[in-house]
Structure formats: structure tokens, C-alpha cells
Image: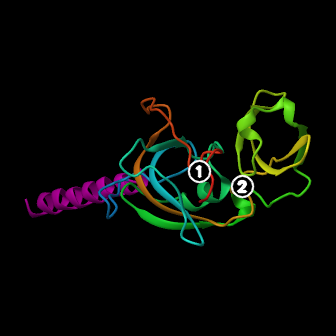
Amino acid sequence: MYDRKVKITALRAAFASCFLLAFAVTGWTQDKKGGAKAVADGKQVSLEYTLTLEDKTKVDSNVGKQPLTFTQGAHEIIPGLEKQIAGLKVGDTKRIEVSPADGYGEIQPDRKQEVEKAKLPTEAHKVGAMLEGRSPEGQSMFARVAEVKDKTVVLDLNHPLAGKKLIFDIKVLNVEDAAKAVELPTAKPADSKAKPK
């Protein structure tokens, strides 16, 4: 009888340790955030953000609006932002500083083009006017009027945020598997038409 009790107790202990081991092996752990998924390649991520420049100029924000939704690792957002949100979880907030090299690039002086005034609308005949067009491949292109001459206009094809450090204050709203994600309208931070004030 005593021998049988010892065997049953030993079996229960073995079963309990196997049960715990099974959960440890499958990675069944709950983190401090209640099991929230982390931002990782292949996940669909929804963010709330405010974008400012070093001089505190507010460029863009979606706070209280449609979230920015994208697939992490698919290069749908600027590289510096994508790199620095990896590992964040739902509810996390972070201030992210992005250098020009990881944002919209450095200003390239050779990205200027002179165009006859007659080929542009009259409202584009002033310095600072923003124009939108299409590249031969069909991609949206944006240009700023940098100089107005007698018969021509000089267009600057650099992105309006090229050469600037970008400061994002973000909050992770949702993280889910991209395959299971519901299709949501997307918004992009610092739309190409955005220009610092």
C-alpha cells in the first residue's frame, strides 16, 4: 500500500513536470502586457503618430484620425521608422528620431529641372508652389518651384522633407498577422505633398 502511494505521487510529479515542460517548449508564456504581439516582419501594424522637425514644426499627425496601417518588413514606410518600431507591442509609445539618410534622403542639388513656363499652370509661376506629376513608370512625383525666370521655371525634385531629421511620436495601436488582418484604408506619414511650415 505504501509502495503504491509512492508510485502514484511520483507519477503525479512526473506528469506535472511534463505538463510544465510542454508549455515551456511551446513558448506558452504571458508577458507583462497580457500576451500582446510584438511588431515583427510580416505583421500588419497600426500606428498613431505625430511628425515634427527639429525646430518643433509639426508636419503631420493622424491622432484622432485613421491609423497608419502597413506590413512590417515590406518597406511600405520610411526605413528609419520601420527599424525602430521592431519589437514594440500594442500600447507601447516611443519617440523616434530618423536621420535624413533613413528618411527622405539628403538634398541632391542635381535634382533640379528647368521647364518652360508655358508647360505649367499659371499658379505654378511662383516660388514655393508645389506640383504633382507622374514619372514615366507611373509613380507619383512632386516638385517645388525653386526659381522663376523670364521664360522658364526651375523645379526642385527633392522631397520636401529631404535633408531633415524627422521626429515621430508614435503609439502602437494594433499588431496582427498580415494574412488574418482586415483590409483597412492606409495613410502614409508625411505625405509627399506635406511641406514644413
Queried whether the magenta region covers residue 175, the answer comes back as: no
Residue 52: where, in percent of width, then height? 54, 63
Residue plotted at (65% across, 52% down): 78
- Which quadrant does the N terminus fall into? bottom left
Secondary element at image label 1: loop
Q: Is the C-beta separation of discs 1 and 2 under 8 Å? A: yes
| Residue nearest the viewer, comparing 188 with 90 | 188
Q: Amino acid at mark 1?
A: Ala
Of residues 118 and 62, the one drawn nearer to the viewer in this rendering: 118
Q: Is residue 165 left or right of residue 34?
A: right
On the image, numbered disc 2 is attached to which residue? 104
Q: Position of residue 30 (x, y in %)?
A: 32, 58
Q: Is residue 140 visible?
A: no
Q: Start and end of the magenta stretch?
A: 1-27
Q: Position of residue 122 (x, y in %)?
A: 75, 34
User: Which of the labelled discs sits on residue 190, or is there none?
Assistant: 1
Q: Residues under labels 1 and 2: Cα distance? A: 10 Å
Is residue 134 rendered to the left or right of residue 35?
right
Q: Where 156 falls versus 118 (above or below)?
A: below
Q: Residue at x 72, y 51 (%)?
A: 128
Between residue 14 and residue 105, name the one nearer to us: 105
Count neighbours of disc 1 (C-alpha within 10 A) and say few if under 14, some if 14 to 19, many if 20 or more: many
- Residue in view at x 63 percent, y 43 percent: 76
Name the residue type under label 2.
Answer: Tyr
- Identity of the residue furthest to the front in this view: 150
Q: Is residue 22 visible?
A: yes
Residue lying furthest left: 1
Q: What residue sits 75% from the left and 51% below the top? A: 127
The answer to whether residue 11 is above or below residue 71 is below
- Most frequent secondary structure within the magenta stretch: helix
In the rendered view, tell whether residue 137 sits above or below residue 16: above
The quarter of the picture where the C terminus appears is bottom right
